Amino acid sequence: MADSALESLLRRDRTIVAASLATLTAISWIYILWLAATMDMGGMAMPETNMAMGTDMDLPAETGRSMGTDQEAGGLASVLGLQPRPWSAVEAGVMATMWIVMMVGMMLPSATPMILLYAHVGRHSLRQGKPFASTGFFAGGYLLTWTGFALAATLGQWLIEGTLLTPALASASRVFSGIVLMAAGLYQWTPLKDVCLSQCQAPIVFIQTHGGFRRDPRGAVALGFRHGLYCVGCCWALMALLFVGGIMNVLWIAAIAAFVLIEKLVHAGRVLPRATGAVLIAAGLWQLMA
């Protein structure tokens, strides 16, 4: 009876994905409301963690943003000849942890169909006396890929913090925002985006293309890691938009996560990526010309 109920639940993968999205959105709104009640929404500086830049920690966000706009973040950080502020080990750890948790929260909902497919087939394989590695190994390999991306994003934040980011960890330069928006938009039109998205949209095709499920833990981790690489290839440019709207802007995080999920679930060919790319390119041009 219990097995039958679980099998029925596993078949409703899209329902579980929708529930995951709803949960993520609800948590995001609750967090936003909590911030509104406890913090200065104009400042949004990160207290007690020294995550802002030097003495700018005490400045209102409007001041930091105005200074960044007027000087275009130091001439776009002297044409990206950046001089990052040294981080302590604690600061680096806090930032890396923040990025890792954020990537897990953003990407697990869209990976749910693939993970549930693995679990579903694994249950049938076990009944036939031919078990393969636990679903946890596959999911761990997937999350390992995004952990690597999170560490790279942490490095990127360190490089531009204090020059191209405000104390609220959002873009301080229209030029920088325009470049990131246009780059993300152009990537939506590339063949690499198409290939990666197609692998993310069709879990069964991905498994068949890459040799099927693995019976050994190492193989399962490698398969999950490979699937994660396709997801990074599909979504890295969209994740870069966090540097525009705000790394700690939870509503912005939820919006990007929702779009990633929709993009993977809606099989509309190239229409959705191309349309999104056009909007991002237009927004980037507007930032550069404003």
Image (tube, rainbow, N blue to C red):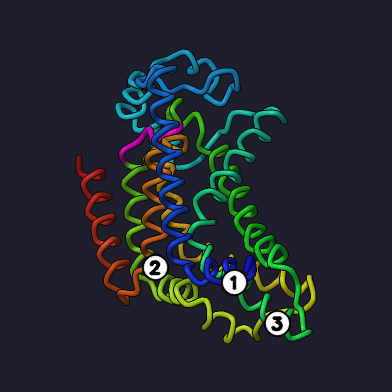
User: Percent x, y for residue 196?
Assistant: 48, 72
Say which element carries label 1.
Answer: helix
- Amino acid beneath label 1: Ser
Measure the C-alpha gap from mark 2 to mark 1: 26 Å
User: Percent x, y for residue 102?
Assistant: 54, 44
Measure the C-alpha gap from mark 3 to mark 2: 27 Å
The residue that label 1 is drawn on is 4
Mark 2 neighbour class, 10 Å CA radius: few under 14, some 14 to 19, many 20 or more: some
- Whether residue 94 can be seen here: yes
- Amino acid beneath label 2: Leu
Quarter occupied by residue 133: bottom right
User: Percent x, y for residue 227?
Assistant: 59, 70
Mark 1 neighbour class, 10 Å CA radius: few under 14, some 14 to 19, many 20 or more: few
- Amino acid beneath label 3: Ser
Question: Disc 1 or 3, which lies upstream in sequence?
Answer: 1
The residue that label 2 is drawn on is 265
- Whether residue 115 can be seen here: no
Question: Disc 2 or 1, which lies upstream in sequence?
Answer: 1
Q: Is residue 244 magenta?
A: no
| Outermost residue toward the front in this view | 1
Could you say which is closer to the camera, residue 259 or residue 279? 259
Q: Which residues are magenta?
A: 169-174
**Residue shown at 24% from the left, 61% from the top:** 278
